[in-house]
Image (spheres, helix red, strand yellow):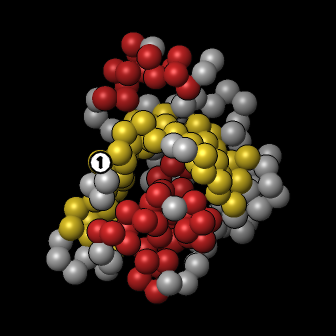
Amino acid sequence: MSVQDILHDQQTIAALTGKPDFVMQTYIHCTRDALWEALTDADQMAEYHFLARKVTQENEIYRHYFESGAPMFTARTVEADPKHRIVSTFEPHWEEDAIISQSTFLIDDEGDHCRLTIEHRGLKYPVVPGEGVGDGWSRWAAGLKSWLETGRAIRFANPAEGEPR
């Protein structure tokens, strides 16, 4: 089934427009322009993502790859309000029966820093603090924040977990 088929399925649309399954906020000392650039530039994404070592972009499609070169996930931007909001599909490739879900980034300028809100809808599994989606987004946000505030790539991967098989 293609991304288009799934996004047009009535149940999926209902799941993706309702209350998010996961929400987190972080505050980053940066400009709205810098945050937008980090969220939309494939080269920067590869610098701060906790597991993806390579990210490619073709039009609105971003493909993330593990260090081994294996596909990690694909994200297709389905809505963008520059410097304010990005809505993307989230298609994991690390499990065979994965479902396509949706992530949203909301950017609010608060003077000398920005508030980034991350929402994730249509998740297959419940969110458990410190595990799975919750852990992944926390590690991702820590890398993004460090990248924007220091200019250094700091990867917050858990070496004990390794790459999913």
Locate the N terminus and report the quarter of the image it occupies: top right
Graded by Cα atoms within 10 Å as few (under 14), some (14 to 19) or many (20 or more), the crowding at tag 1 reads few
Q: Who's the residue at 51% across and 71% down the image? A: 143
Image coords of residue 46 (percent x, y): 62, 65
| 150 up-or-down from 10: above or below | below
Drawn side of residue 109 relative to residue 41, left or right = left
Image coords of residue 138 (percent x, y): 46, 62
Q: Who's the residue at 49% across and 77% down the image? A: 147
| 152 up-or-down from 40: above or below | below
Image coords of residue 94 (percent x, y): 71, 42
- List the residue tagged with mark 1: 81
Of all residues, the one furthest to the top in this rendering is 10
Q: Identify residue type, mark 1.
A: Asp
> Residue 94 versus residue 67: which sits nearer the camera?
67
Number of numbered labels in the structure image: 1
Q: Who's the residue at 22% across and 62% down the image? A: 108
Q: Who's the residue at 69% across and 39% down the image? A: 93
The answer to which quarter of the image holds residue 30 is bottom left
Q: Is residue 23 visible?
A: no
